[in-house]
Amino acid sequence: MGEKESEKVVWEPMRTSAATLIAPTAHHRTTPKLLVILVLFVSVTYVVYTLKLVATSHACGHVSFPTATFSKTVPAGNASATVTVPAIPSVLRRESRETNSDDRTDLRHVVFGIAASAKLWEQRKNYIKLWYRPREMRGVVWLDEKVKSREDRDALPPIRISGDTERFRYTNKQGHRSAIRISRIVAETLKLGMKDVRWFVMGDDDTVFMTENLISVLRKYDHNQFYYIGSLSESHLQNIFFSYNMAYGGGGFAISYPLAKALYKMQDRCIQRYPGLYGSDDRMQACMAELGVPLTKEIGFHQELVCSLASVYVLITSMLIGADLLEQYDVYGNLFGLLASHPVTPLVSLHHLDVVEPIFPNAPRRNCCRVRRSKEKEKMVIDVGMCRDGEVSET
């Protein structure tokens, strides 16, 4: 018994080690089989897919592409030869400019919606006088409450009181619920029923518009389509906190008439869904997202105006119209460096005159800028200098 038990003790470890060696060998034998099966499956799938493409594709040799030709007679000594050259077919771009002069977008097709507050109206109304021309433009100033009537009403757009917004929830602790009122200005302006409107342009009471350049921007787009046109902030932190796909309202933004009608039908329900948003801009952008309309960026609706560029003239020529600028300045103080490195593009709007340095100490900031049209066609000049009382845009 002793010998058998000793043999058992010796053989048991040997069997265990042998089994351990055999098991991995069997596993390694099955692995190549799986790889081969996988490779075969992929290869067969690829071949079948390729054959299906070849079998279902049609030859395009018989398709005639639309081409145009023009002929030109080239004199060569005493003889002349006619050369026929195929012309490149013109492609109608989405942003092609309007060509029919009779149907071109003009100031009469634009309605301005201006957000204002009764508390700051006496100061801010002077900014509107810089650019608004009552006989040539249409617009409405929307206030939160009534203000006393003054003699300068003829130089300003009509004043209306915004509708009640108490039924809308507002839960943002850092903001103010007036953002709801301001976000509804486009819809309230549409409700007035003005005729022959193509674009609604939104701005603040301290926004200064370069109206000729604004029109040149709007002419690039089909007003019968859904367009939400605006620009970002110059502040990287602002864009991170809010959005890089949002038009900042202070610098201004434009909405085509069909889009304004669609917005009018759903905006109140949209606003109810976003009580935690901060301002009017992000509420508008949220509703645009629900409508499936992205921001069309035109980097030129400015958020902060540079008024400390003594004796500097910003000349905007027709050569620059092709890349228009809608800028949203969120910078404070002296903006000389920012303006000196300004893109070669026309200005469309300027905003926040109250937070930049005036050209003269203690001078009203509204006196630091006036806009006038150059005698030459398609030019606008911004004069940076002191304006006398009552001296406004003579365009």
Image (cartoon, rainbow, N blue to C red):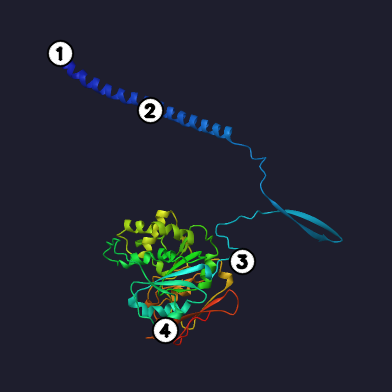
Residue drawn at x 35%, y 56% as measured from the top left: 269
Closer-to-camera residue (209/263): 263
Q: Nearer the viewer, mark 2 or mark 4?
A: 4
Sooner in the amino-acid sequence: mark 1 or mark 2: 1
Question: Residues under labels 2 and 4: Cα distance?
Answer: 93 Å
Sooner in the amino-acid sequence: mark 3 or mark 2: 2
Q: Position of residue 319 (x, y in %)?
A: 59, 70
Label 4, secondary structure: give it: helix
Q: For mark 1, what is the residue?
A: 3
Residue drawn at x 48%, y 31% as measured from the top left: 45
Left or right: 351, with 90 as reference point? left
Q: Position of residue 244 (x, y in %)?
A: 41, 60
Left or right: 229, with 73 as reference point? left
- Residue 87 visible? The answer is yes
Q: For mark 2, what is the residue?
A: 31
Q: Tell me whether the residue at label 4 lies in contact with that at label 1, contact meaning CB atoms closer than 8 angstroms.
A: no
CA neighbours of label 3 inside 10 A, class few (<14), some (14 to 19), many (20+): few
Q: Position of residue 162 (x, y in %)?
A: 36, 69
Closer-to-camera residue (250/255): 255
Q: For mark 4, what is the residue?
A: 151
Q: For mark 3, what is the residue?
A: 102
Q: Is residue 130 above or below residue 271?
A: below
Q: Which amino acid type is shown beneath numbered disc 3? A: Asp
Label 3, secondary structure: give it: helix
The image quadrant of residue 114 is bottom left
- Find the residue positioned furthest to the top: 1
Q: Tell me whether the residue at label 1 lies in contact with that at label 2, contact meaning CB atoms closer than 8 angstroms.
A: no
Sooner in the amino-acid sequence: mark 4 or mark 1: 1
Q: Nearer the viewer, mark 3 or mark 2?
A: 3
- Residue 344 visible? The answer is no
Label 2, secondary structure: give it: helix
